[in-house]
Image (tube, rainbow, N blue to C red):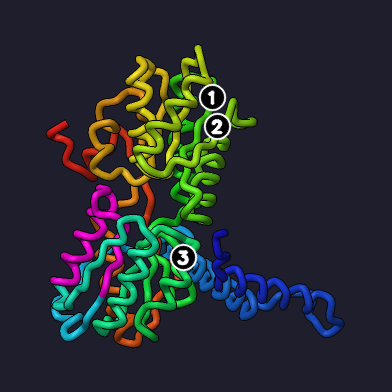
Amino acid sequence: MPKRRFNVAWALAGIVLTSAALMSCSGTADTETTADESKMEQSQAEETKAEETDAEETEAEQPADAEFVAFRKAEPGSGEGMKLGLIALDDTIPFSKQVSDSIKREAEAAGAELVFCDSKLDAATALDCAKNFATQGVQGYLNFQPVSDAAQSICDAGPADAPVIAIDIAQGNCQQAFMGANNSRAGFVLGEGLGKFVKEKFNCEYDAYVSLEDKGVGEVNDLRMNGIRDGFQSVCPGELKNERILDAGRQDLALTKFGDTLTALPGMERIIVVGINDDTVLGAYAAAKTVGRGENLIMGGMSADPSSHCEIKNNPNWAGDSGFFPEHYGEIGVPYLIDLVSGKEVPENLFVDHVFINKDNIDEYYDTSNC
């Protein structure tokens, strides 16, 4: 919800108006305005107008609703002598690999030692990572492990009093900041862009809506996928047609589960497919192509990681992605983690700015010359 900013100019104007009203009701108020009073009122009006203009200019310079923080490179030497940690998601996944690489790059630039541990999507492995961090004396770490139900036990096993920045998934009460996707907004960005695509090409006419989700990540899934629904329905209103929700957060699961679902949707020519990440949409698309129905899918993904770039650029049925820019995550995570270890306060939410990326603008963000 956008925070309301206090506009000093309107407040001053209100005081002036209130004072005038009180004077008009008072028995001692003059019925005529003297020349000096007129000049004073004119001066007040001019000051109010100038302050209002300044307030509007200041407001215009701020990010909308302070929804995101800017990327910032780690300051050279800022992490000298620090031992930081990273529990990765699974670096066989392109998104995770980009996040890890960016964090490694920025930690090195800052002069900090980085202890890296890949959870490989496994809670027990992530728990071992946290225990290892405690043994090695890690002073603060970034945590991207994906099992929300295990977050608190992993948190408890880590180094005592070490600040934690969660990446995209909440990580228990040791978390001092949440970094990454503003999940509901990211979903809305995709849903709105997808809705505009469907409206322009098909006048919002479609046969089914399939949502490829990952229930294991808890609230992240709900915020992201409901955000997609809200965004889509803001353009193409009404109940979603023949909605199917599949718990298929990985490419292999989406390949199998969507293949089964496709069999249950015979004769449907326009099937909207959205996913919690690009992997799931790619899995569904592979399943559809296997049975000669790839052209029946209208697709939209989350993150715009390298696996989707050529689809976004060249596939006429891939509407676009909500951009997450994982290749820049280190430019948020590392500088703010160094701030925490140094005893500084940081914002509770360190969101990236989400942009709808499609064939028309992808070259502004990524090199697609190999597509």
Residue 139, located in which quarter of the rendered image?
bottom left
> Which residue is disc 2 drawn over?
244
Residue 34, located in which quarter of the rendered image?
bottom right
Frontmost of labels 3 and 1 is: 3
Frontmost of labels 2 and 1 is: 2
> Does dot 3 land on a helix, a strand or a loop?
helix
Residue furthest out toward the top: 267
CA neighbours of label 2 inside 10 A, class few (<14), some (14 to 19), many (20+): some
Coordinates of residue 219 in the picture (x, y in percent): 53, 56
* Of pointers 2 and 3, the one earlier in the residue sequence: 3
Pointer 2 with pointer 3, Cβ within 8 A: no
In percent of the image, x 66 and y 75: which residue is there?
Answer: 16
Q: CA distance from mark 2 to mark 1?
A: 8 Å
- Position of residue 251 in the picture relative to residue 368 (left or right): right
CA neighbours of label 1 inside 10 A, class few (<14), some (14 to 19), many (20+): some
CA neighbours of label 3 inside 10 A, class few (<14), some (14 to 19), many (20+): some
* Of pointers 3 and 1, the one earlier in the residue sequence: 3
Q: Quadrant of the C terminus?
A: top left
Residue 150 shows which numbered tag?
Answer: 3
Residue range in magenta is 85-108
Residue nearer the viewer, 356 or 128: 128
Q: Amino acid at mark 1?
A: Ala
Q: CA distance from mark 3 to mark 1?
A: 35 Å
Q: Quadrant of the N terminus?
A: bottom right
Residue 208 shows which numbered tag?
Answer: 1
Q: Amino acid at mark 2?
A: Arg
Q: Amino acid at mark 3?
A: Ala
- Position of residue 62 in the picture relative to residue 206 (left or right): left
